[in-house]
Image: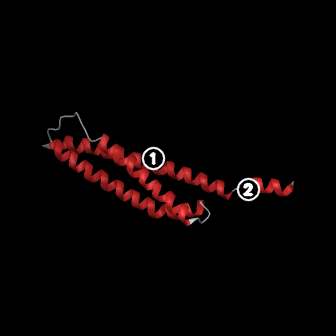
């Protein structure tokens, strides 16, 4: 009985956290993407949507893979400890993905802000 309750609460909490983080990143990331992509709204919205889809696929996939346990759960304490470990790993993955995405997007933005050396070289020739 404890295992089923643990699975259900783990799924509910993990999926709710994933949805909340994805919506927050989608909403806040649009402005950052617009800046990085020189105001190209269709491209920024498309990239933003693709990032969210990838985010969901990776996180829901991990959540599903991490669902099973071999641990015998005979009391509430063991359920809480197992679930907190599993949710903690999900949160760490969400955080790592967020920082990786921010790194990639900041690199894109940095490149977009650099002067175009091809144009400068052609003009000086």
Give the residue pinned by disc 2.
116
* Viewport quadrant of the N terminus: top left
Q: Secondary structure at mark 1?
A: helix
Taking depth in this image into account, of 37 and 96 the one nearest to the observer is 37
Q: Identify the residue at horizontal 40%, vertical 61% (top origin).
A: 23
* Place of residue 68 in the rendered image (x, y in percent of width and height, measured from the top left): 25, 38
Q: Secondary structure at mark 2?
A: loop
Give the residue pinned by disc 1.
96
* Viewport quadrant of the C terminus: bottom right
Q: Identify the residue at horizontal 45%, vertical 64% (top origin).
A: 27
Above or below, comparing residue 20 to residue 81 in the picture: below
Q: Identify the residue at horizontal 52%, vertical 53% (top origin).
A: 102
Taking depth in this image into account, of 115 and 2 the one nearest to the observer is 115
Q: Quadrant of residue 53?
A: bottom left
* Place of residue 54 in the rendered image (x, y in percent of width and height, measured from the top left): 43, 50
Residue 113 in view here: yes
């Amino acid at each position: 009985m404890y295992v089923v309750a643990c699975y259900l609460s783990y799924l509910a909490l993990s999926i709710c956290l994933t949805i909340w983080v994805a919506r927050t990143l989608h909403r806040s990331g649009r402005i950052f993407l617009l800046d990085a992509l020189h105001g190209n709204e269709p491209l920024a919205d498309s990239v933003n949507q693709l990032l969210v889809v990838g985010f969901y696929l990776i996180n829901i996939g991990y959540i599903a893979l991490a669902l099973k346990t071999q641990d015998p759960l005979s009391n509430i304490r063991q359920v809480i400890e197992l679930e907190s470990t599993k949710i903690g790993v999900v949160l760490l993955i969400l955080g790592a993905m967020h920082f990786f995405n921010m790194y990639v997007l900041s690199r894109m933005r940095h490149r977009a802000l650099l002067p175009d050396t091809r144009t400068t070289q052609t003009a000086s020739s």
